[in-house]
Image (cartoon, rainbow, N blue to C red):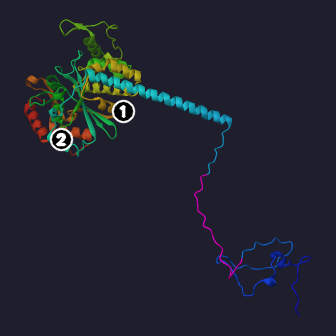
């Protein structure tokens, strides 16, 4: 016995014809419904009155034309501009105040930089007027081996400058005065590291003209040109620039910086004060000087670390009766390093004061662009090592006939090898033929005199 499926209570099927509004008996018999390939087959089911009407897909018959599909031109939508939320009134005021302060600070920095530039340019112009000299390149002597290999050797990337301090307080900076101080400043242009080497002024060397004597006489005879050639020929260097400073210039520089901190020993006090008197006092015979303490100079009365003024620090550099000339050059380097530290923190006004007081006592081959380049990099320069030439274990002293007391490089070639290792970290440096010949000549002249 067949029974009908049980239906839910109070629910009856809905007449499909009334929903579609198309009588099923009028549907053509020979037409079969065609669906798009992408459409899935529709599963019919009974819908009751309380159910929502299902979504009907459109059916196309075989004899009906395919609907025209319009091509829509795609246009890139314009980016939506989102309006930023307006900050709270108090936050807006803070932001506005911060922006205003930033502009003020930027303006102050710009003025400060401009002031520095003006001071530097003014300083350089003073150099150009009173102390600039052009050294003809063709007159500078560099040993052939050095000149040919400098671009590929260990010296590549270094700038070497000769520093001369002359024993003059009357502005005689060009020549006719012996260089009391001879130094080489070697700057590593990549790292900013600087090394200082003092060449002892009484060192027996070739004066660049095949005559041999104390090396400080080269400046007296031929000025900075001959002094530079003397250094290049004897030491296998490639120096082309120099700076010369007189004692007045050194004292004025230190005074403009507010003095320098120096540790003075008890043994140095009397000699320091005597040199002060000789620099500012009066004399009738050129040997005995008189000056008023407290008026012409300020005596140093105690030992220990203290601030020395320009005259005191310059006199300290000149002390030669405590220790030997090697200790004297050490004192000179000590003062130079103290000055370098003060310059790093100097104000524009201080630099201007130095420009007014010092540059008339400066003589140099550096031009405007080179000085600006050096000043621009000054903040990153740092003295990392210092030494003396000849090296302590390879030198001797003795009275070399009429030349007087001299510092003798026991072997010039060995000392030059040490120098290139010290400055350029070249342990395997081989001196040039010229240096080897000078070394033999020095040994022949001095062997009977040295201790």
Q: Secondary structure beneath disc 1?
A: helix
Nearer to me, 389 or 322: 389
Image coordinates of residue 13 in percent, x first then y, are 86, 78
Residue found at x 31% / y 35% = 194
Magenta extent: 59-79
Q: Quadrant of residue 433?
A: top left
Q: Which residue is mark 1?
A: 376
Q: Tell me, yes or no, if residue 109 can be seen here.
A: yes
Dominant secondary structure of the residues highlighted in magenta in the image:
loop
Residue found at x 66% / y 39% = 87
Q: Which residue is mark 2?
A: 147
Q: Label 2 vs label 1: CA separation? A: 28 Å
Reply above or below: 128 against 25: above
Q: Which mark is residue 283?
A: none
Image coordinates of residue 227 in percent, x first then y, are 17, 28
Image quadrant holding the C terminus, namely top left
Q: Is residue 7 magenta?
A: no
Circles 2 and 1: CB atoms closer than 8 Å: no
Q: Secondary structure beneath disc 2?
A: helix
Q: Earlier in the sequence, mark 2 or mark 1?
A: 2
Nearer to me, 85 or 188: 85
Image quadrant holding the N terminus, namely bottom right
Image coordinates of residue 176 in percent, x first then y, are 16, 20
Reply above or below: 27 against 212: below
């Amino acid at each position: 016995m067949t029974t009908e499926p049980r239906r839910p209570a109070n629910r009856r099927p809905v007449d499909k014809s009334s929903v579609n509004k198309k009588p099923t008996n009028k549907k053509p018999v020979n037409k079969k419904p065609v669906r798009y390939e992408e459409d899935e087959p529709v599963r019919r089911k009974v819908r009751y009155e309380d159910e929502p009407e299902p979504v009907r897909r459109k059916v196309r018959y075989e004899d009906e034309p395919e609907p025209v599909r319009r091509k829509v031109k795609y246009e890139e939508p314009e980016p939506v501009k989102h309006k930023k939320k307006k900050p709270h009134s108090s936050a807006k005021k803070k932001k506005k105040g911060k922006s205003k302060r930033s502009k003020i600070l930027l303006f102050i920095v710009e003025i400060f930089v401009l002031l520095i530039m003006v001071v530097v340019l003014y300083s350089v112009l003073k150099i150009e007027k009173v102390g600039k000299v052009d050294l003809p390149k063709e007159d500078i002597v560099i040993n052939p081996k050095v000149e040919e290999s400098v671009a590929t050797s260990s010296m590549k990337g270094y700038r070497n400058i000769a520093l001369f301090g002359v024993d003059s307080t009357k502005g005689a900076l060009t020549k006719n005065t012996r260089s009391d101080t001879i130094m080489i400043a070697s700057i590593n242009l990549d790292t900013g590291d600087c090394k200082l080497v003092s060449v002892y002024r009484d060192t027996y060397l070739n004066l660049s003209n095949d005559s041999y004597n104390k090396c400080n006489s080269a400046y007296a005879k031929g000025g900075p040109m001959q002094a530079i050639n003397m250094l290049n020929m004897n030491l296998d260097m490639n120096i082309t620039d120099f700076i010369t400073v007189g004692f007045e210039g050194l004292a004025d520089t230190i005074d403009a910086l507010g003095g320098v901190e120096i540790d003075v020993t008890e043994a140095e006090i009397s000699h320091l004060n005597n040199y002060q008197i000789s620099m500012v006092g009066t004399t009738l015979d050129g040997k005995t000087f008189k000056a008023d303490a407290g008026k012409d100079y300020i005596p140093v009365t105690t030992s220990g670390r203290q601030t020395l003024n320009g005259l005191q620090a310059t006199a300290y550099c000149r002390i030669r009766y405590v220790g030997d000339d090697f200790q004297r050059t050490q004192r000179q380097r000590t003062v130079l390093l103290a000055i370098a530290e003060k310059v790093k923190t100097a104000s524009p006004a201080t630099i201007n004061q130095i420009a007014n007081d010092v540059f008339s006592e400066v003589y140099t081959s550096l031009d405007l662009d080179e000085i600006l380049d050096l000043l621009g990099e000054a903040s990153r320069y740092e003295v990392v090592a210092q030494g003396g030439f000849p090296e302590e274990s390879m030198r001797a002293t003795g009275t070399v006939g009429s030349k007087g007391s001299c510092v003798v490089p026991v072997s010039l070639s060995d000392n030059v090898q040490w120098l290139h290792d010290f400055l350029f970290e070249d342990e395997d440096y081989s001196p040039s033929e010229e240096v080897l010949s000078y070394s033999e000549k020095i040994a022949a002249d001095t062997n009977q005199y040295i201790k």
